[in-house]
Image: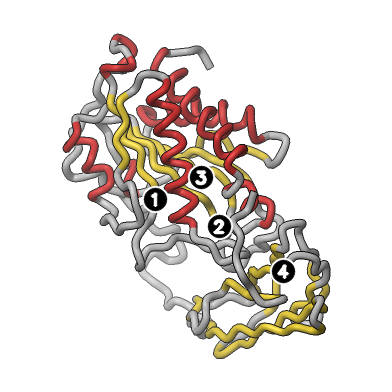
Amino acid sequence: MLLGCAMLAVAISAPRPDQKLPFVERCYVLGSVEQGVTNVVVQGVDVPVYKTGAWAAYVDVAEGENTITAVCDGPDGRSEATRRFTVAARPKPKAETANDGKPADPVQYKKLEYAGDFPRSHPSAKTPGELTVVVDPGHGGKADKGCISPHGWFEKDANLLLAEAVREELVKLGYRVVLTRRNDREIKIYDRPKAIYAVGGDAFISIHHNSPPLNRDASVLRYAAVYSWNPLGDAMARAIAKRMDDVQRSEMKSNGAMHANFAVIRNPEIPSCLIEADFITHPAGEEAAWDPVRRQKLAEAIAAGFSDWHKGVPE
């Protein structure tokens, strides 16, 4: 069930007002309509409306100032919303370098500076009550809202709701759990995994919801994935991704366990992973993220996947 909110007959939530985008030739636009409205026209093109009133369009844009217009026919007549934003100029071609067109050397991502260099032993010999899991609801605070949904809700809030549900399920299984935040506050990126060391943690799980690049169509891109940086985190990521797929495969595909260089999971010592539970920019993903029944099933799956990894259940 989606949270209720008052709105105009048609509203645009993204891009944000006066936002400056990097150079793109197309970008997604998100918005919503009030209950009962079934038609939206964005830049002269009909856009499907999801059952919750959410919609996502994919429009052409140009360098400089852009104005996007969305129109619908509501119970009180025609309603129109506009959004102005700026697109940066096309980058100039890079000058030839001494590499003579050869690929640049790959970026060497550094580990967390406070992490040890060697992996700890797998904790299968420990009971759940002897393990402390740090669960990190991504983003938070006024300056770091994360991505935005068609109804204008923020990823930071969806992350906290899911993280709290995961904490409850892990506690039911006997684990000790610490959340990096329990409310809407900002935490610096490298302070999040640092909490592992402050509380003597044995594993780190960061909870997020996804959004596509600006130049992709938000109405079609939707999948779940669990990311890790090294083999130590990969085993945990695979176990969690498998359980998540069990409850999500009827809704969307799973990309399973994937490699990434996200700052919070670059830990050679302690198993760490980052979950992208869904795309809240997709109308169906938005509905799913704020549905308490579906959230509970997903939290149970994440906790079960962690338990599988802890117990060494064969993949």
Q: Earlier in the sequence, mark 4 or mark 2?
A: 4
Q: Give the crowd class for mark 4: few <14, some 14-19, many >=20 residues within 10 Å.
A: some
The local secondary structure at tag 3 comes to strand
Q: Give the crowd class for mark 2: few <14, some 14-19, many >=20 residues within 10 Å.
A: many
Residue at point 48%, 80% (across, down): 20
Q: Earlier in the sequence, mark 2 or mark 1?
A: 1
Q: Are marks 4 and 2 in contact (CB under 8 Å)?
A: no
Label 1 and label 4: CA atoms lie apart by 30 Å
Q: Position of residue 89 (x, y in %)?
A: 51, 85
Residue at point 31%, 12% (across, down): 127
Q: Earlier in the sequence, mark 1 or mark 3?
A: 1
110 sits left or right of 105 in the view? left
Q: As shown in the figure, which amino acid type bears the numbered disc 4?
A: Glu
Q: Which residue matches tag 3? A: 276
Residue 228 quadrant: top left
Q: Position of residue 114 (x, y in %)?
A: 16, 42
> In the image, which disc is placed on residue 138?
1
Q: Which residue matches tag 2? A: 211
Q: As shown in the figure, which amino acid type bears the numbered disc 1?
A: Gly
Residue at point 59%, 52% (across, down): 279
Q: Are marks 3 and 4 in contact (CB under 8 Å)?
A: no
Tell me how many marks there are: 4
User: 87 or 136: which is nearer to us?
Assistant: 136
Label 3 and label 2: CA atoms lie apart by 9 Å
Q: Earlier in the sequence, mark 1 or mark 4?
A: 4
